[in-house]
Amino acid sequence: MTKSRNGDIVVIYWELLSHAPKRARNGSARGIAVFAAIIVQGSALMDYVTLGSTGIKVNKNGFGALPIQRVSDSEAEYLIRKAYRNGITLFDSARDYSDSEKKLGLALSGVRDKVFIATKTLTLDKGIFWEHLETSLKMLKTDYIDIYQFHNPPFCPKPGDESGLYDAMLEAKAQGKIRHIGITNHRIHVAREAAESGLYETIQYPVSYLASREELELVRLCADKNIGVLAMKALSGGLITDSAAAYAYLLQFGNVIPIWGIQLESELDEFISYQDATPCLDNRAKIVIERDKEELSGEFCRGCGYCLPCPAGIGIPIAARMSLLLRRAHESFFFNNHCRESMLHAGECTNCRHCVEHCPYSIDAPKLIRESWEEYRELV
């Protein structure tokens, strides 16, 4: 480990044990094996992490480039270059993130050999796969992509299947256009199948201190299989408001790197500061985590956006979470254009169930929207 922290191992044991059933806490062989495996992998408490078999070594801050869609080219360039100057070298985008790849290309083309770029394709068509790959290469101003990922497919692509997608990945790798094959998902069964298959070098999945036991077991499985985990939604789509606690929690996992969605310089500065003054999973953080687990238990929207577009024009990722955001977000959030536009038609939900059918978590979004709309009208 590169830094020592008093009490880290004890705190890690506390946190992981809090997820264990009673029989595991009492020392059953299986319980000990499951949680000890994570502790062993995470005991290499480091500021740097190697992403499994890729050999890619980066610090514990990944730059999520989805939010830079909402800023100008010059603002995005400034943020990306500042991130690089401060030691952040992993940047994650997607073909589906409008001009995000273009902005990364503008900012990073001069230091391409010193950074790692991950991007994704949402297509399930092998012909369009190649179109997306070539467009990504052009936008990113590069002739190779370090980690090319299938973007939340409803199944786990494999060699020889009828989709032809994994075979296309292998061909792209043989051509030198991609270096490592990854997959992103919001469905635990697809992510687990990908991990068990041995076909993927990285898996991007929502991981935060709100993770379930099943999701923590996915992290352990990936560690066992030497698979790097890119942790999306490390702040649970904005519902986690203590980034220091979120950072400290993820630091315990030796195969996990959080991908922080960054739009503001203040957000970037916050994560950069943790590289020198590393947050600990101390009593303060434990209290925050337990409070949030209690408040956010049960059904809530993760803000992934796969329910969109809504036939009624509702901004579901905001509207379905508004009841929680009213209690957790800064008041300035409710008066920005993005929030106002998302809530503009929230009272017009027809209960068509389109969102439910497309939700990876099978959440009853219409119910959440109705409840949130009532509170929003009263308070805002």
Image (spheres, rainbow, N blue to C red):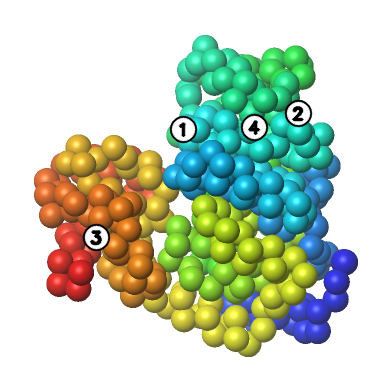
Q: Secondary structure at mark 1?
A: loop
**CA separation, marks 4 and 2?**
18 Å
Mark 3 is surrounded, within 10 Å at the Cα level, by few (under 14), some (14 to 19) or many (20 or more) other residues, namely: some
Quickly name the residue at label 2. Answer: 179
**CA separation, marks 2 and 3?**
42 Å
Relative height, residue 369 to residue 243 (above, below): above
Q: Secondary structure at mark 3?
A: helix
Image coordinates for residue 161, horizontal then vertical, percent: 56, 19
Q: For the C terminus, which image quadrant?
A: bottom left
Quickly name the residue at label 1. Answer: 98
**CA separation, marks 4 and 1?**
13 Å
Q: For the N terminus, which image quadrant?
A: bottom right
**CA separation, marks 2 and 1?**
23 Å
Label 3 is placed on what type of residue? Leu
Label 4 is placed on what type of residue? Gly
Mark nearer the N terminus (2 vs 3): 2
Quickly name the residue at label 4. Answer: 105
Report the residue at 88% width, 66% height from top: 2
**CA separation, marks 4 and 3?**
39 Å
Q: Is residue 180 left or right of residue 16?
A: right
Q: Given the current orientation, which residue lies at the most extreme bottom position?
A: 283
Mark 2 is surrounded, within 10 Å at the Cα level, by few (under 14), some (14 to 19) or many (20 or more) other residues, namely: some
Report the residue at 31% width, 40% height from top: 308
Q: Are marks 2 and 3 in contact (CB under 8 Å)?
A: no
Relative height, residue 336 to residue 226 (above, below): below
Quickly name the residue at label 3. Answer: 368
As rendered, which of 159 and 92 lies closer to the eye?
92
Q: Is residue 256 left or right of residue 238?
A: right
Q: Secondary structure at mark 4?
A: helix
Q: Are marks 4 and 1 in contact (CB under 8 Å)?
A: no
Mark nearer the N terminus (4 vs 1): 1
